[in-house]
Image (tube, helix red, strand yellow):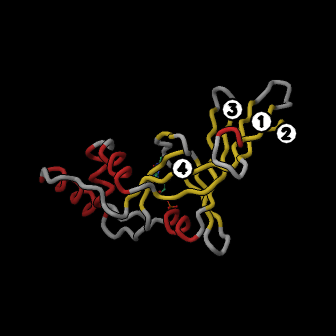
Amino acid sequence: MTLATASAAARPSARTVILKGHDGDGLLFESQSYSRKGVELAENPFAAVALYWREVHRQVTATGVAEPLDPSLSDVMWERRPFANRAAAIVSEQGALLEDEERLQSAVAELLRSGRSLDRPPTYHAYRLSPSTMEFWEGSDERLHRRLFYERGASTSLVAWTYRRIQP
Ligand SMILES: Cc1cc2nc3c(=O)[nH]c(=O)nc-3n(C[C@H](O)[C@H](O)[C@H](O)COP(=O)(O)O)c2cc1C
């Protein structure tokens, strides 16, 4: 999904991240807290995501607050990552200047060969975007696409969601 964040100075940025799943409270993704997105979320937790399915001409968007999960939950999600992905996430300093790609590759290979346990770096978090709005967009051949806009009220209970149809 595309994840948009903005700095405290309201400068936006966007990138693709994997939607790792969802729980009762929101959409889950993983990243490094020192990355641009991580720094921006620490300054300003408001974020937006967009998912697009070209084959079925549908889009889901959401806005809300994105925050790191409890470390024990981040650990659970970390353990589900393939071995090589964990090694890459440990070795690669996301966003830092790359001076020597070969050295980075051999550091990952060396870590994998070493058989050392690949613990979650304390900077690597699972985040949850808790939506306050969600929109479901369905493309139509007649060009009058359908949009269902959901908004969450002050309460966190499910019944606090209201929805309205909005014009395409
Ligand atoms: C298909 C795809 C999936 C990606 N998944 C993730 C992800 O789950 N987490 C992540 O940190 N970066 C992921 N990336 C890399 C990000 O798009 C981005 O380059 C990186 O997170 C640094 O972003 P930032 O500097 O804006 O924080 C993915 C990229 C692509 C193209």
**Does 113 appear above or below 32?**
above
Q: Is mark 1 on a helix, strand or loop?
A: strand
**Does 41 appear above or below 165?**
below
Q: Position of residue 122 (x, y in %)?
A: 33, 63
**Image depth: mark 2 or mark 4 in front:** 2
Q: Where is residue 30 in the image (x, y as percent from the top left)?
A: 44, 52
- Residue furthest to the left in view is 114
Judging by the rendered image, the residue that carries numbered circle 1 is 148
Q: Distance between the residues labelled 3 and 4?
A: 18 Å
Q: Distance between the residues labelled 2 and 4?
A: 27 Å
Judging by the rendered image, the residue that carries numbered circle 4 is 16
**Image depth: mark 2 or mark 3 in front:** 2
Judging by the rendered image, the residue that carries numbered circle 2 is 166
Three-letter code for the amino acid on which mark 2 is drawn: Ile
Q: Where is residue 75 in the image (x, y as percent from the top left)?
A: 32, 51
Q: Is mark 2 on a helix, strand or loop?
A: strand
Sequence-earlier tag: 1 or 4: 4
Three-letter code for the amino acid on which mark 1 is drawn: Leu
